Image (spheres, rainbow, N blue to C red):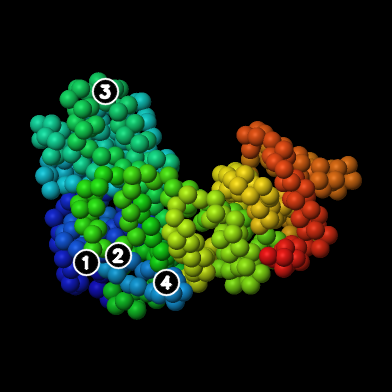
């Protein structure tokens, strides 16, 4: 079997117009996959130079396969049909190990064809290290490397405004573009760089915040040999991903033209304000996950997919999203409903086994950020407690008792919450407090909620009633009773 290379696969060559910090699975199955689609369906004609931003040799460079690899996209499409798509990605021209070939990395700054920079150096990658020096080869922090490179570009092109770039970080932090720019400016100050360079950064370059959304399981280790036999070639860089993808970029309008998005069917949005899309994702996708975990897990279900295959849990989750979460959000209702449909299809994806316990990490913080804002907005607008969210909160408190039947649940959260729940459930078991007092203590934790939620009209009573029913009858009978009233 031949190794995947440009000698045995028909492919195209594109001029390098994009530089990318990071060679990991996510960028290759998300950004590079989209660049490949745009190359094939529009006039983009863009090749990518990948920069390996850290010093390690455990994984060979993409160069051993001439930058080629296969994406395996699996999931349910808009019609709910299972799809599986194999695609050889050929937009990567080279991978440069910056610690071993710093001069090659810096030489890219002299290319007039280069227009865009993408990055994903993990959440910890956008950091400021005050010991980094301008003459390091390279500096350690990703923003410091970027500052070195941008300074060289500024000097090579004599500060020409036409030499500016669109810089789009994809790291999973809020307003990643603004944060990256802020740290680049810190390096300008640390290294006492000239004011002309600072002005060029401000006026000729666009640092764009982004929202990225796609589940990328990565290298299909268990299926690797089988897939190679099916494809007929050896590929050690193949990567799997779900069907759904969303890329929201808070950037200039000319980026649509730069990326040739006019005739593209890709789910890429160039917007003035990314916050409504972030709010939508956190509330609908992440909020549904967080609400689902305790109720499904305590109903003896272990995965997201199995949860959606259960008629009761599916009905509950659908009702939660459409009746209680969507009405609290600011985007147009048709956009929200379309996104919700995609979310439910993603949850049903038969190709991804998403364990509920893997989502349960730090659930109290997740409940605070993902569900509580919508719960409070719902109460304010409707003057009543949302029943589905109240049931989720009751399930959350029951989950933190740490028991599923006769088995212990391995709880993972902040020590303060774990200690408080252990004490409250011990006091309840000893008859020292009632269910209502237990719930009130949880809701009154201002150190976590930043307010006393026990003062929200009807919330303590509703959650306590559902929790008592779950203790007396079980989670499924309680949900069945709640859903029968809807």
Spatial CA distance of label 1 from label 2 is: 9 Å
Nearer the observer: mark 1 or 3; the answer is: 1
Spatial CA distance of label 2 from label 4 is: 14 Å
Q: Residue at x 33, y 72 (%)?
A: 86
Q: Few, some or many C-alpha atoms within 10 Å of disc 3 (few <14, some 14-19, many ≥20)?
A: some
Q: Residue at x 68, y 50 (%)?
A: 385
Where's residue 172, x and y in %? 42, 46
Local SS, label 1: helix
Q: Earlier in the sequence, mark 1 or mark 3?
A: 1
Looking at the image, can residue 428 be seen?
yes
Local SS, label 4: loop
Nearer the observer: mark 1 or 2; the answer is: 2
**Quarter holding the N terminus?**
bottom left
Label ID, residue 77: 4
- In the displayed image of the protein, which residue is found farthest to the top? 192
| Front residue of 366 and 404 | 366
Where's residue 442, x and y in %? 72, 41
Spatial CA distance of label 4 from label 3 is: 50 Å
| Front residue of 303 and 202 | 202
Spatial CA distance of label 2 from label 3 is: 44 Å
**Residue annotated with mark 2:** 265
Where's residue 401, x and y in %? 75, 50
**Residue annotated with mark 3:** 191
């Amino acid at each position: 079997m031949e190794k995947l290379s440009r000698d045995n696969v028909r492919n195209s060559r594109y001029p390098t117009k994009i530089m990318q910090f990071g060679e990991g699975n996510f960028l290759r199955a998300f950004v590079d996959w989209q660049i490949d689609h745009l190359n094939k369906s529009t006039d983009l004609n863009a090749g990518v130079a990948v920069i390996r931003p850290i010093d390690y040799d455990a994984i060979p460079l993409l160069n051993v396969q001439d930058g080629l690899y296969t994406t395996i996209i699996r999931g349910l499409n808009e019609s709910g049909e299972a799809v599986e798509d194999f695609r050889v990605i050929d937009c990567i021209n080279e991978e440069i190990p910056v610690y071993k070939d710093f001069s090659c990395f810096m030489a890219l700054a002299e290319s007039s064809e280069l227009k865009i920079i993408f990055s994903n150096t993990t959440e910890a990658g956008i950091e400021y290290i005050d010991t980094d020096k301008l003459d390091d080869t390279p500096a350690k922090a990703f923003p410091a490397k970027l500052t070195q490179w941008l300074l060289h570009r500024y000097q090579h092109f004599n500060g020409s405004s036409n030499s500016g770039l669109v810089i789009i970080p994809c790291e999973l932090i809020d307003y990643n573009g603004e944060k990256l720019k802020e740290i680049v400016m810190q390096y300008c100050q640390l290294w006492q760089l000239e004011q002309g360079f600072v002005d060029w950064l401000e006026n000729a370059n666009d640092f764009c915040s982004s929202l990225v959304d796609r589940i990328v399981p990565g290298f299909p280790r268990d299926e690797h040999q089988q897939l190679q036999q099916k494809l007929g070639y050896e590929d050690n860089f193949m990567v799997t991903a779900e069907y759904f993808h969303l890329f929201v970029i808070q950037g200039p309008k000319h980026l649509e033209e730069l990326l040739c998005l006019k005739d593209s069917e890709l789910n890429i949005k160039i917007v003035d304000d990314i916050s409504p899309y972030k709010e939508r994702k956190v509330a609908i996708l992440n909020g549904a996950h967080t609400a689902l975990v305790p109720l499904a897990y305590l109903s003896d279900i272990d995965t997201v997919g199995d949860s959606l295959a259960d008629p009761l849990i599916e009905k509950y989750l659908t009702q939660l999203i459409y009746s209680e979460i969507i009405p609290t959000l600011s985007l147009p209702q048709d956009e929200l409903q379309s996104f919700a449909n995609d979310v439910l299809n993603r949850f049903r994806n038969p190709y991804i086994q998403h364990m509920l316990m893997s989502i349960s990490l730090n659930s109290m913080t997740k409940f605070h950020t993902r569900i509580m804002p919508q719960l409070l907005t719902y109460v304010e607008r409707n003057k009543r407690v949302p029943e589905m969210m109240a049931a989720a909160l009751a399930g959350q408190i029951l989950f933190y008792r740490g028991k599923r039947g006769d088995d212990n649940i391995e709880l993972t959260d902040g020590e303060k919450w774990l200690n408080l729940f252990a004490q409250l459930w011990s006091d309840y078991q000893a008859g020292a407090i009632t269910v209502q007092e237990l719930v009130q203590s949880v809701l009154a934790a201002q150190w976590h909620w930043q307010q006393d939620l026990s003062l929200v009209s009807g919330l303590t009573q509703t959650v306590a009633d559902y929790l008592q029913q779950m203790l007396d009858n079980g989670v499924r009978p309680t949900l069945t009773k709640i859903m029968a009233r809807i």
